[in-house]
Amino acid sequence: MNTESFIRPTLFLSISITIIGSMFKIMHWPYATLIMAFGMILMLFFIISAIYEVMNSSKIDGSEKFMWVIGFLFFGIITGLVYLLSARKRIV
C-alpha cells in the first residue's frame, strides 16, 4: 500500500474541513455537524494510514513506534503535523 500520495492531502484536508465545520457551528449555519463529522472521518483515515506507516517502519525501534501510536491516538492533529513536517523522512 503506497501511502505517500494519501497521507499529506488527507491531513490537510481534514484540518481545513474541520475548521470550516467549526466556523459553521459557531455561526449556527446548517450542516455544521455533518461537515465536522466528515472532517473527523478524514482524520481517522489519516491516523490509520500514519499508524500503518509507523508500525511497518524498520528504521525506528519499538518504544518509538509506541510513542508515535499513542501520539496519533490522543493528539491526532498535533502529532500529524509534527510527523509530516519533521519526522516522516526519518521514519519511512
Image: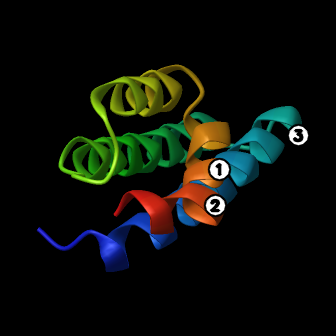
Numbered disc 2: secondary structure: helix
Instruction: Evaluate if marks 1 and 2 touch, with contact meaning CB atoms under 8 Å apart.
Output: yes
Q: Residue at x 56, y 47 (%)?
A: 80
Q: Residue at x 39, y 42 (%)?
A: 47
* Residue neighbourhood size for the residue with mark 1, other residues' Cα within 10 Å, grouped as few (<14), some (14–19), many (≥20): few
Q: Residue 89, percent across and down?
A: 48, 69
Instruction: Evaluate if marks 3 and 1 touch, with contact meaning CB atoms under 8 Å apart.
Output: no
Residue designated by label 3? 27
Q: Residues under labels 1 and 2: Cα distance?
A: 6 Å
Q: Which mark is residue 86?
A: 2
Q: Residues under labels 2 and 3: Cα distance?
A: 35 Å
Q: Kindly identify the amino acid type of the residue bearing the numbered disc 1.
A: Val
Q: Nearer the viewer, residue 12 or 21?
A: 12
Q: Residues under labels 3 and 1: Cα distance?
A: 31 Å
Query: Is the residue 78 above or below the residue 71 in the image?
Result: below
Residue designated by label 1? 82
Q: Residue 64, percent across and down?
A: 42, 31
Q: Nearer the viewer, residue 80 or 63?
A: 63
In the picture, the quarter occupied by the C terminus is bottom left
Q: Is residue 12 left or right of residue 70?
A: right
Q: Kindly identify the amino acid type of the residue bearing the numbered disc 3.
A: Met
Q: Is residue 82 left or right of residue 56?
A: right
